[in-house]
Amino acid sequence: MDSARAGDLLACLAQVPDPRGRKGLRHPLKAMLTAAVCGFLCGCRGWVGLAEWLDDLPLDVCHWMGFKRWPPKQDCFRDLFLKLDPTEFEHAVRVWMTECLGLEEDQSLRAVSFDGKTLRGSLRQFTPAVHLLAAVDHQTGCVLSQMRVPNETNEHKTALELLKNLVLKGTVIVGDAAFCQRDLSEAIVAEGGDYFFAVKENQPGLLQDISHEFAASPAAFSPLCPA
């Protein structure tokens, strides 16, 4: 990472509100967030690995990140991220990522996949595991936005909220049959986007309904049934 792009990361993370109280603050928020982003980009997995990675860094690198004393341990990171607003943090990283990649605009459609995954290690004795729905850009492989799927609902309903964080004009939303819902499809089209949802034999009723629609309309086209 060159110094200019690294400096942009520091500037973006400085915009994230600090959720901690003033009492007992030992490390600047910007420094901790920078360490977390850089550490995970370097392959750290979890707070233990992040703390060990920081311990191995030269002292001048820690000072560049903004630490004024010896870097924090794993519990400091854990406590911070339990309080941190994920939307604000995600926005800051997304702004830096967009500037860093410097992608040029073209006329081709942009593909973004909706995919849900259960967060590893999030299951607790009296708490269900955290399930996240992410929007992943095909060109860069980056997560553009993600939201937690509430326990009382499903990925389809969460996808309706996730759409509000995306620019849909010129975008094709890709997903499996779980997203093949009328309200979701209408919301995508209404904002200038397109969609491509894969429906297979494990959804026989839905597959039959779609096949009948294509058969009834001479102008319709299905990649599974070439003319």
Image (spheres, rainbow, N blue to C red):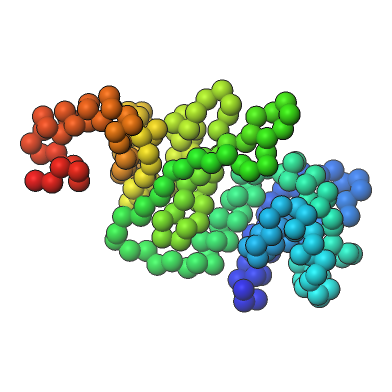
Q: Residue 130, image x and y in percent?
A: 62, 36
Q: Which residue is drawn at 60% across and 71% down?
A: 5
Q: Would residue 70 be found to the left or right of residue 173 on screen?
A: right
Q: Which residue is drawn at 79% across and 62% down?
A: 52
Q: Can the viewer see residue 212 in this picture?
A: yes
Q: How many labels does the image show?
A: 0
**Camera-nearest residue between 192 and 139:** 139
- The residue that appears at 35% across and 55% down in the rendered structure is 110
Query: Is residue 30 among what the camera can see?
Result: no
Extreme residue toward the front, this view: 202
Give residue 61's quadrant in the image.
Answer: bottom right
Q: Residue 110, relative to residue 9: is it above or below?
A: above
Q: Quadrant of residue 57?
A: bottom right
> Left of 213 or right of it: where is 82?
right
Residue at (33, 31) in percent of width and height: 202
What percent of the width, then of the height, locates residue 149? Answer: 55, 33
User: Is 77 positioned to the left or the right of 68 in the image?
Assistant: left
Q: Where is residue 198 in the image (x, y as percent from the top left)?
A: 32, 40
Q: On the rendered image, what quadrant is the N terminus found in?
A: bottom right
Q: Position of residue 186 (x, y in %)?
A: 32, 32
Observer-nearest of 25 and 221: 221
Left or right, residue 18 beside residue 206: right
